[in-house]
Amino acid sequence: TGNLWGYGKEDGPSVWHKNYPVAQGDRQSPIDIVPHQASHDPSLGPVVLNYDQCTSIKIANNGHSVVVEFDDSDDRSVIRGGPLDNPYRLKQFHFHWGVKGCHGSEHTVAGNSYASELHLVHWNAVKYTTFGEAATAPDGLAVLGIFLQHHGRFVKAVFFFFFFFLLQGSAADFKGFNPKCLLPSSLHYWTYLGSLTTPPLHESVIWIVVKDPITVSEKQVTCLAGSSEPALGRLLPASGLYLHTFLTQGLYTRNWEF
Ligand SMILES: COc1ccc(C[C@@]2(O)NC(=S)NC2=O)c(OC)c1
Ligand SMILES: [Zn+2]
């Protein structure tokens, strides 16, 4: 397929509309969220996540991001409430990060960006029979966006190390990872009707962007990096495991400080 699109000068967001005209649509994401211009909707209840029977399967690098895939053959892992009329099934999560500096998030808040942004992708299995069908329907997908705070240089290096050495198109086992540990304690959110943030840019996403970012402490990373040091040579096949450990240890202990 060649490089239909990318983030360079010749194939980046400013020219995506040439191959994907919907890029000039009226519900395109990401957006800049301006908190004091957001209107409060009292009819919106809390967002509820049931990830306990989490069903992660594998981690893969699809050339644009690192994706953790889930088994979405039933309603074991769903999101409900908030702006959603019924439960949406967890399909995958992936991260967005910038290649330079700590401004990799896609959404911005009052013009400010975060180091990276996690997208937990869910689909409306009540109304649609496949993810692909839901991905083209106006109420087909619900994506929970979580901001990740500025990483230190070291943290970022480890993130890159874990994420990027997964050679493109490769995949590693990544079972039993519960993404609930990737969430801040409060799920106060903004919500709006938007789109996929990369081609095909379908306008099929009910966005739920969580206000509070999560942070990663250098301490957590140091301990992990130290533990994986001797295993560096073996890291390739065990990548999923180490990333799993990294994400789980740091997150479960909740010693998020920065
Ligand atoms: C055909 O279905 C697709 C295609 C691409 C993505 C990925 C992405 O474009 N969408 C968001 S959200 N972030 C992204 O990078 C997708 O994710 C739900 C679904
Ligand atoms: Zn995304």
Image: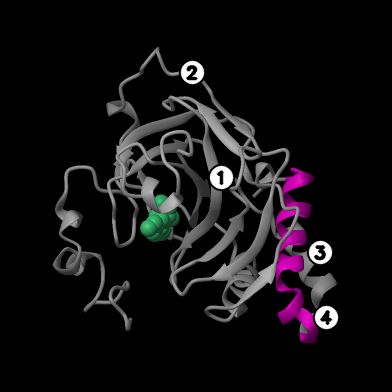
Residue 253's x, y, as percent? 79, 45
- Using the image, tell me which numbered label, if any, was put on residue 231: 4
Q: Marks 2/1: CA distance? A: 20 Å
Q: Residue at x 17, y 43 (%)?
A: 26
Q: Name, please, the residue furthest toward the front.
A: 129
Residue 241 relative to residue 202: left or right = right
Q: Marks 1/3: CA distance? A: 30 Å
Q: Marks 2/3: CA distance? A: 39 Å
Q: Residue at x 65, y 47 (%)?
A: 179
Q: Marks 3/4: CA distance? A: 14 Å
Q: Residue at x 61, y 49 (%)?
A: 215
Q: Give the labeled residue for mark 2.
A: 45
Residue 41 relative to residue 51: left or right = left
- Using the image, tell me which numbered label, if any, was put on residue 30: none
Residue kind at label 1, given as amino acid type:
Leu
- The mark closer to the camera, 2 or 4, is 2
Q: Residues within 10 Å of mark 1 (few under 14, many from 20)?
A: many
Q: Residue at x 49, y 56 (%)?
A: 116
N-term-proximal mark, 2 vs 1: 2
**Quarter of image, res 85:** top left
Quarter for ligand 1? bottom left
N-term-proximal mark, 1 vs 4: 1
Q: Marks 2/4: CA distance? A: 46 Å
Q: Give the labeled residue for mark 3.
A: 223
Residue kind at label 3, given as amino acid type:
Cys
250 in the magenta segment: yes
Residue contact at pointers 2 and 3, CB within 8 angstroms: no
Residue stretch rendered in magenta on the structure: 233-255
Q: Residues within 10 Å of mark 4 (few under 14, many from 20)?
A: few
Residue contact at pointers 2 and 4, CB within 8 angstroms: no
Q: Residues within 10 Å of mark 3 (few under 14, many from 20)?
A: some
N-term-proximal mark, 1 vs 3: 1
